[in-house]
Image (spheres, helix red, strand yellow):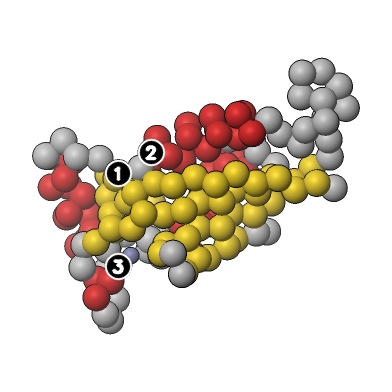
Amino acid sequence: MFKTAKQFSFDMAHMLDDHDGKCRNLHGHTYILQVEVAGELCPDGAKRGMVIDFGDLKTLVKQHVLDKMDHAFIYDVHSARESQVADLLTRLDSKVYGIATRTTAEAMAKHIFDLLKTEAGLPVSLVRLWETPSAYCEYAE
Ligand SMILES: [Zn+2]
C-alpha cells in the first residue's frame, strides 16, 4: 500500500468559549493542513502509477475545506458566546463557518477528515493540522 500526502495553508479566526486561558479571546492562526491518502496504484489510464493525482487532491481539498474555512471565523454552533460573534460577522458580510463542536485543533482535524472522507469521497488515511509552527494534532481512524 502507498501513502501520499499534500500540504496546504489557510488562515482562520476562532475562540474557545469557557477556556481557562487566553484562547477564550478571539484570535487567529495560520494553519498548516497535511492530508494523507492511502491506496494502491492506479493500474491504467491517465492516472496510471498514481495513488491519486496531486492536482485532483488539491482540487478536492480546496473545494471541500479551504473554500469554506480560509479567512473565516470558525465557531462552535452550540456556544452562545461564539454564535453571537458569528451573527454579528454575518450581518457585517464577513465569512463564518460553524461546526457542532469546540474548535480545538483536535476537533477540526477530525472534522476535516470526515469532510474529505464522506463529502469528497477521498481514501484519506490521516489528517495532520498544525495550529502553530510547534503544535499539531493528527486524526486517523
Ligand atoms: Zn487558537
Q: Measure how far apart labels 1 and 2 are at the Cα level.
A: 9 Å
Please identify, in this view, whether the residue under mark 1 or under mark 3 is nearer the observer. Answer: 1
Do the CB atoms of the residues marked 1 and 2 lie less than 8 Å apart?
no
Q: Which mark is residue 71?
A: 1
Q: Position of residue 138 (x, y in %)?
A: 57, 62
Badge 1: how crowded within 10 Å, few (<14), some, or many (20+)?
some
User: Is residue 73 among what the camera can see?
Assistant: yes
**Considering depth in this image, is 98 or 51 the residue closer to the camera?**
51
Quick one: quadrant of the C terminus? bottom right
Q: Amino acid at mark 3?
A: Leu
Which residue corresponds to mark 2? 68
Residue at image position (68%, 30%) is 53
Would you say 128 lies left or right of 14 here?
right
Q: Amino acid at mark 1?
A: His
Ligand 1 sits in quadrant: bottom left
Q: Measure how far apart labels 1 and 3 are at the Cα level.
A: 17 Å
Would you say 81 lies left or right of 97 here?
left
Q: Quadrant of residue 133?
A: bottom left
User: For numbered disc 2, what is the local secondary structure?
Assistant: helix
Q: Is mark 3 within 8 Å of ligand 1?
A: yes
Image position of 83 with respect to 95: above or below: below
Residue at image position (50%, 51%) is 33
Badge 2: how crowded within 10 Å, few (<14), some, or many (20+)?
some
* Residue at the right extreme, as displayed: 43
Q: Is mark 2 within 8 Å of ligand 1?
A: no
User: For numbered disc 3, what is the local secondary structure?
Assistant: loop
Lower sequence index among marks 1 and 3: 3
User: For numbered disc 1, what is the local secondary structure?
Assistant: loop
Which residue corresponds to mark 3? 16
Q: Amino acid at mark 2?
A: Lys
